[in-house]
Image (cartoon, grey):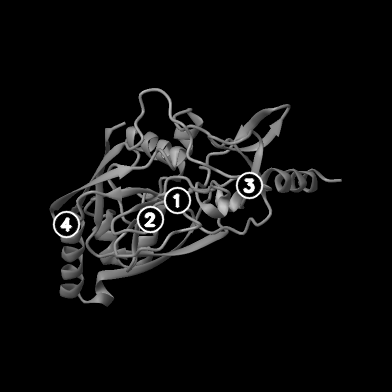
Amino acid sequence: MSFRKIGRIICATAISGLVIAAPVLSGCNTDHPRAKITVEFAGESYVLEYTLYRNMYPQTVQHFIELADNGFYDNTVIHNYQADKWYGGGYAYNDDETVGYSASYEEGTEAMLDYMEAVSKESAYAALAEEGKLTPSVYRNFINDNYSEPLNTLIGEFSNNQHKIENGALNKSFGCLSMFYTAKDVDGDWVYLDKQGSEKGVMGDYKYNCATSLFSVQVNTSTSSDSAYCIFGTLNNSDVLTSLTEAVSEASSDAGSTNFTKDVTMYVDNLDEFIEPQTNEVTYKLTMTPIIIRSVEITRY
């Protein structure tokens, strides 16, 4: 019998009857850390204040905090502008007059593609993981009761990935933060999850445990849940995000919708250990006036 078949049998056994509850916290960490995200648009700054839910999504919150504390999100850009969500966390902002964001946008799609490839933060993320600055939660192997070969990805704390919250699970409220991962053709590739509050050696499908640094901000109102992405933070000052979205909408109207956004198709996840480079293609919608994440600061742990 092959290792993969054995793994699937183990996984089925581990998943069967598994109930995930919020873990008990220890040390000086609080149930609800706070974060401050400063966004700049058209020369104006907007400070978004967040409550993070470590009590329900401990490993996602820890991962976000570690990235923020290492300055990873500072001076990045919203790289996919959609009607319901804005996506960030993967591309730096460069204001160089000849090869920067605005100059590349004006030059055209090919120049913007070159820009995006040049400012991708995939390598910077991998470097943080390799330097031990990110806490591992996903592993390739589990041998003799020990995890081995840590992967540079984050465990998925949502219901499609065995993470059940009995009461109070977060919904898609206006401004909420979610960790994001791109879809990959990796069905049936199992990994081992070092999950807080669970038995050791539980397995999960890699496609649900492959997030790195990407996140989304909900910009419409909703009360629905999300079974495939971890919502881990809620916005405290919705009026500020409302002002920002109104400013972006006004700029879009002034420029004309066809001019205000540009679609760029590119390869992503080129350092992913489970897929080949230059195989996972996505299309991003970029804005003529950049939506810049100037800083992400943890204000309470």
Callout in the foreground (3, 2):
3
Q: Amino acid at mark 2?
A: Met
Look at mark 4 in the image and give the residue it sits on: 239
Q: Earlier in the sequence, mark 3 or mark 2?
A: 2
Residue 295 position by quadrant: top left
Can residue 2 be seen here?
Answer: yes
Query: Residue sitting at 44 percent across and 33 percent down?
Result: 128
Question: Mark 4 packing: few (<14 Cα in 10 Å), some, or many (20+)?
Answer: few
Question: Residue 116 bears which disc, if any?
Answer: 2
Question: Residue 204 bears which disc, if any?
Answer: 3
- Report if the CB atoms under discs 4 and 1 are less than 8 Å apart: no
- Report if the CB atoms under discs 3 and 2 are less than 8 Å apart: no
Does residue 37 sit above or below 136 in this rendering? Answer: below
Question: Residue 186 bears which disc, if any?
Answer: none
**251 and 175: which is toward the camera:** 175
Q: Amino acid at mark 4?
A: Asp
Query: Residue sitting at 43 percent across and 38 percent down?
Result: 63
Q: Secondary structure at mark 3?
A: strand
Q: CA distance from mark 1 to mark 2?
A: 26 Å
Q: CA distance from mark 1 to mark 3?
A: 15 Å
- Report if the CB atoms under discs 1 and 3 are less than 8 Å apart: no
Query: Residue sitting at 45 percent across and 59 percent down?
Result: 226
- Report if the CB atoms under discs 3 and 4 are less than 8 Å apart: no
Relative to residue 57, is residue 40 drawn left or right? left
Look at mark 1 in the image and give the residue it sits on: 230
**253 and 20: which is toward the camera:** 20
Does residue 212 sit above or below 97 in this rendering? Answer: above
